[in-house]
Image: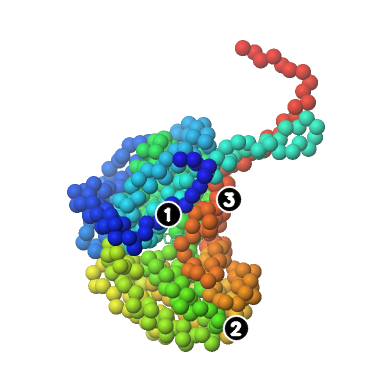
């Protein structure tokens, strides 16, 4: 494999019967391994797998009675130990150089490719992700390995810059930042954990991964793959644990140089605040990368192709049960198309199949856990008192399912219009003009993704100029950014940092250095033996 040539991993075509058969077999094999207790997650520090007193079962959100494996959660003492261990391994890992580390990370991508069906099947069962979404998650993880390996090659050789004075030699180079903490969410349990971790490692940082509690088993598979690929035991720690317990210990540790977080706005802002405190003996300012939530809008123009718009909105709003940071949660429709659009949207949404994630026909699976289910059911019940309900679909009783819910004529000051629900709950509202639609879409704390369905070239051009989002999609769905093609990330309260899967991403994980030498020597000092 040539690291310098990046190509996206193609998704599995589940319309082919042989692919469906293979995936059913993978699900069966994962279930069998789960039954005999082969899946577990436990802290790994300095290459040592540690069992701990706090153990939880990782359950299938489609059927919570089914246990997929056991998770040993790390405590505060292990969090401290993980950082100390990485401090010891940093020098050797950095000394390997970009080229060798890139080879290791690309090999990790190859190992994922070899077991892609097992990884996707495990994700279907542990995260409740439907087949196509789980497969796309694995493809994205492989892409992150390959893409960041390629990008790292570009950082390996110091750049020779123009001299300002005669005889001046100017070099610009990159070195690792130090010890890094990666904290990942459950909704892209392999892709996001992989992307942040391998970006940090390939740049020479000794890195600890703290995955989301709900998807620790998938993250443990990543840890195994990274170690098998050749990441030094002393440069990588794996720390499943409860965020509120070990998160503050990791974030506040004075020996940590870099924090890379993807998750909720509340936790992200807490991390930002805690990491700004300079601890005892600390001689650096921590670099913080945060990728947070969104309240993403799609505008449907009065001349839009309604069939396309409905298809795009359904996938963006209800794919993976709306549990994507990029998911559409607001639709703004031009007045002339409003009634027709709402009626047809509700009919189409009512036909979507809500079922256990392991069934191939499932469009909407369960929410991740009981806490999310309760939160969403309460939220919908409460907003129903003041909003106009356009659809509340049927859903299964077993598992953490919630109905597909659509509210219409939602006012811009309603909490549901403004705050992330992270569920298949959609707000729709009319706009009297395209300008007003843009203004409504932009009136948000967030700026992550957004979209427009229109056949008017001038409106599409206006949206390019004026719609304030990190990832804008025109006449298509607004989720599913592809590594290297659609670098992903937002601004405002959607986060700080360069886009994941983009050419600038790795620059956040390195310390740039400029070296200037005056070569106009006045004689040489002989080297003493
Ligand atoms: P979350 O913030 O609850 O948890 C994320 C991670 O933070 C988990 O590993 C958790 O254990 C840890 N954590 C919790 N409390 C902590 C603390 N006090 N200190 C340190 N770490 C702590 O988020 P989630 O529910 O896992 O994920 C959903 C959120 O993530 C949504 O808001 C979504 O929009 C966002 N998200 C954003 C992106 C993006 O690229 N912008 C991508 C995916 C998800």
* Inter-mark Cα distance, 2 to 1: 40 Å
Q: Quadrant of ligand 1?
A: bottom left
Are the residues at dot 1 and dot 3 in contact (C-beta closer than 8 Å)? no
Whether residue 457 appears in this view of the structure is yes
Q: Residue 427: x, y in percent? A: 45, 78
Q: Residues within 10 Å of mark 1 (few under 14, many from 20)?
A: few
| Residue at the disc numbered 2 | 433
Disc 1 C-beta below 8 A from ligand 1: no
Label 3 neighbour load within 10 Å: few <14, some 14-19, many 20+: few
Q: Residue furthest right?
A: 166
Q: Residue at x 54, y 63 (%)?
A: 471
- What's the mark number on residue 330? none
**Helix or strand or loop: what does disc 3 sit on?**
loop
Q: Nearer the viewer, mark 1 or mark 3?
A: 1
Going from N to C along the chain, the mark reached first, 2 or 1, is 1
- Of the numbered discs in the image, which one, if any, rests on residue 10? 1
Q: Residue furthest left?
A: 36
Q: Nearer the viewer, residue 239 or 133?
A: 133
Q: Earlier in the sequence, mark 2 or mark 3?
A: 2
Quarter of the image where one finds residue 444 = bottom right
Is label 3's Cβ within 8 Å of ligand 1?
Answer: no
> Which image quadrant: the C terminus?
top right
Q: Position of residue 423 (x, y in %)?
A: 39, 70
């Amino acid at each position: 494999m040539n690291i310098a040539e990046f190509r996206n991993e193609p998704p599995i075509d589940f319309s082919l019967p042989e692919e469906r058969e293979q995936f059913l077999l993978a699900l069966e094999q994962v279930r069998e391994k789960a039954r005999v207790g082969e899946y577990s997650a436990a802290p790994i520090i300095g290459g040592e797998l540690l069992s701990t007193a706090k153990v939880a079962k990782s359950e299938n959100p489609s059927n919570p009675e089914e246990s997929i494996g056991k998770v040993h959660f790390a405590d505060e003492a292990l969090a401290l130990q993980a950082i100390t261990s990485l401090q010891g391994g940093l020098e050797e890992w950095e000394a390997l150089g970009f080229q060798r580390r890139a080879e290791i990370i690309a090999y990790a991508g190859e190992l994922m490719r070899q077991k892609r069906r097992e990884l996707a099947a495990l994700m279907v069962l542990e995260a409740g992700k439907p087949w196509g979404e789980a497969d796309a998650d694995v493809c994205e993880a492989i892409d992150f390995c390959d893409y960041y390996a390629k990008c790292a090659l570009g950082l390996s050789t110091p750049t020779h810059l123009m001299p300002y004075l005669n005889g001046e030699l100017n070099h610009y180079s990159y070195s690792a930042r130090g010890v890094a903490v990666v904290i990942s969410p459950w909704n892209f349990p392999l892709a996001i954990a992989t992307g942040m971790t391998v970006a940090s490692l390939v740049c020479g940082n000794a890195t600890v991964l703290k995955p989301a509690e709900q998807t620790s088993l998938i993250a443990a598979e990543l840890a195994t793959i990274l170690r098998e690929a050749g990441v030094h035991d002393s440069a990588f720690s794996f720390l499943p644990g409860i965020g509120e317990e070990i998160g503050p210990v990791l974030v506040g540790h004075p020996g940590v140089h870099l924090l890379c977080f993807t998750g909720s706005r509340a936790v992200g802002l807490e991390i930002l605040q805690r990491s700004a405190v300079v601890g005892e003996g600390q001689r650096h300012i921590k670099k913080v990368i945060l990728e947070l939530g969104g309240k993403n809008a799609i505008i449907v123009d009065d001349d839009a192709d309604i069939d396309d718009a409905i298809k795009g909105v359904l996938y963006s709003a209800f794919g993976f049960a709306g549990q994507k940071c990029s998911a559409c949660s607001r639709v703004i429709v031009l007045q002339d198309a409003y009634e027709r659009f709402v009626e047809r949207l509700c009919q189409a949404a009512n036909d979507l199949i809500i079922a256990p994630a392991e069934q191939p026909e499932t469009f909407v699976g369960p929410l991740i856990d009981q806490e999310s289910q309760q939160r969403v059911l309460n939220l919908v019940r409460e907003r129903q008192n003041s909003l106009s309900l356009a659809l509340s679909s049927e859903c299964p009783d077993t598992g953490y399912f919630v109905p597909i819910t659509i509210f219409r004529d939602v006012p811009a000051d309603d909490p549901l219009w403004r705050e992330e629900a992270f569920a298949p709950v959609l707000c729709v509202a009319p706009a009297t003009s395209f300008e007003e639609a843009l203004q409504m879409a932009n009136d948000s704390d967030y700026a992550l993704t957004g979209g427009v369905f229109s056949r008017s070239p001038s409106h599409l051009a206006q949206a390019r100029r004026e719609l304030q989002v990190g990832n804008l999609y025109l006449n298509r769905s607004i989720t599913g950014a592809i590594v290297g093609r659609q670098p992903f990330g937002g601004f405002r309260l959607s986060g700080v940092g360069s886009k994941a899967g983009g050419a600038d991403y790795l620059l956040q994980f390195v310390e740039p250095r400029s070296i200037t030498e005056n070569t106009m020597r006045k004689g040489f000092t002989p080297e003493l033996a």
